[in-house]
Image (cartoon, rainbow, N blue to C red):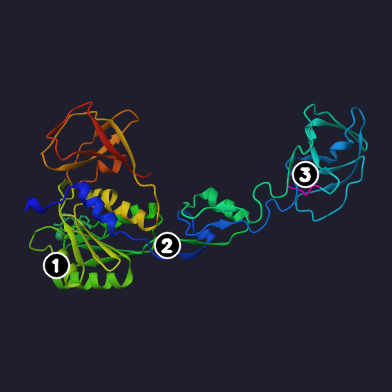
Amino acid sequence: MATEMLTVTEAKAIILEHAKFLPPVNMALSRAAGMVLAEDVYASINIPAYAQSSMDGYAFSFTDLIAGKPLRIEGVIAAGSNETGVLSPGKAIRIFTGAPVPVGADTVVMQEKTKVEGESLYIEDGNMQQGLNVRTKGSEIKAGDLAVAQESLLMPAAIGFLAGIGVTEVLVYPNPSVSIIVTGNELQTPGQPLQPGQIYESNSYSLQAALKQLHITDVKVFHAEDTLDKVRQVIHDALQKTDVIFLTGGVSVGDYDFVAAAAKENGVEKIFHKIKQKPGKPFYFGKKENKLVFGLPGNPASVLTCFYEYVEPALRQMVKQKKGLKMMKVPLEETFNKTAGINNFLKGFYDGKAATPLHAQESYRLSSFANANCLIKIEEVATVCGKGEIVEIHLLPI
Ligand code: AMP
Ligand code: MG
């Protein structure tokens, strides 16, 4: 019933209405990379906590600098030194990068710009200024100042910055746990010999890899035979254990397609079933309380296309990430003929100038998808999309 089918735009919007974030949790900083902060984090101390030399050289008081007159070198301070000595007037002290600048000194000259004769230090830096080569206390951040704001994505530098101000734990939006339920009596596990009529099961592999790129690693894989009973039972199990459920296969109209019925018998509310798109027309989306159920078509290319176009944006919204697949408008390299009323997602290659649809667009094939770097979106209305026409592409994550 074509009239019931949603457009791609409608389906995307509906899914996002239902994708709610999970309650924030405390997470060890070392495990929080890629997550979004659920609180403002403030510095509890001044960083640096003491005035530090930023060079290997000599520390001294700028007011002691008189042209042509040497300073007298007395002592050494290395990084990690806890000496709190006072430098007396007219003296300089050997100092190394990261070491505390003693009281009485306010400036460091780098060793390359000095001449040392015995204990006399001649400063040969024409650009000497008070405070040069000294990182003052609190110059990175002051105690009480905002370090990283709520809703920030914890990229590697943010993790390092927070560690550098002494933070060990942060409140973040947790990643959802995911069940992948593969259905199909024909499926054989890679590594086992293929019996007549069998194919290797690949969807759980591509999906786990795609989830890994989103830092989602709490993933359970279930196998269900093609009976209503088995599919119902496995969905029941998955609903107990995880926040998000993917099913692959069994979502179409064949005699062995039990996903929609089995989901219903588990109290999953069908939000929609089928989208005007190719590949991935039989895509199913349902919900039970806050648990999302994605019925992905079984064909491997449909599974991944639906993942990138619909599931990934939902998962990102659940963890409050703003960044999704990068979208660009670029010229199409080759004419593509299509059926009107269907949105196509083509496996494509974008070379920096234009996007080329790859060979092997059939949904059972992954050979060209394996070399694609984008999906090319060809709108529902068109019957032909000519070479040079501007199309929307979605860059696949690297
Ligand atoms: P279905 O929607 O169950 O009719 O499956 C559609 C196509 O996808 C069939 O050719 C299946 O054999 C294939 N398929 C289903 N599940 C998988 C899987 N996990 N890995 C690889 N191919 C699959
Ligand atoms: Mg099947």
Quarter residue 185 falls in: bottom left
**Of helix, strand and loop, which one carries label 3?**
loop
Depicted 388 relative to depicted 187: above or below: above
Decide if residue 113 is on the left or right side of residue 261: right
Q: How many marks?
A: 3
Decide if residue 51 is on the left or right side of residue 147: right
Q: Is residue 64 something that shows in the picture? A: yes
Q: Which mark is residue 174?
A: 2
- Magenta segment range? 96-101
**Of helix, strand and loop, which one carries label 2?**
loop
Q: CA distance from mark 3 to mark 1?
A: 71 Å
Q: Position of residue 323 (x, y in %)?
A: 39, 47
The residue nearer to you, when weighing 311 against 8, is 8
Nearer-N-terminus badge (3/1): 3
Depicted 68 relative to depicted 377: above or below: above
For disc 3, the marked residue is 96
Depicted 194 relative to depicted 362: above or below: below
Q: Position of residue 219 (x, y in %)?
A: 35, 63
Disc nearest the viewer among 2 and 3:
2
Q: Is residue 60 magenta?
A: no
Quarter residue 342 falls in: top left
Q: Residues within 10 Å of mark 1 (few under 14, many from 20)?
A: some
Q: Which mark is residue 125?
A: none
Decide if residue 101 is on the left or right side of residue 367: right
Look at the numbered discs 1 and 2 and tell me whether their residues touch, using CB distance below 8 Å. no
Amino acid carrying label 2: it is: Pro
For disc 1, the marked residue is 261
Amino acid carrying label 1: it is: Ala
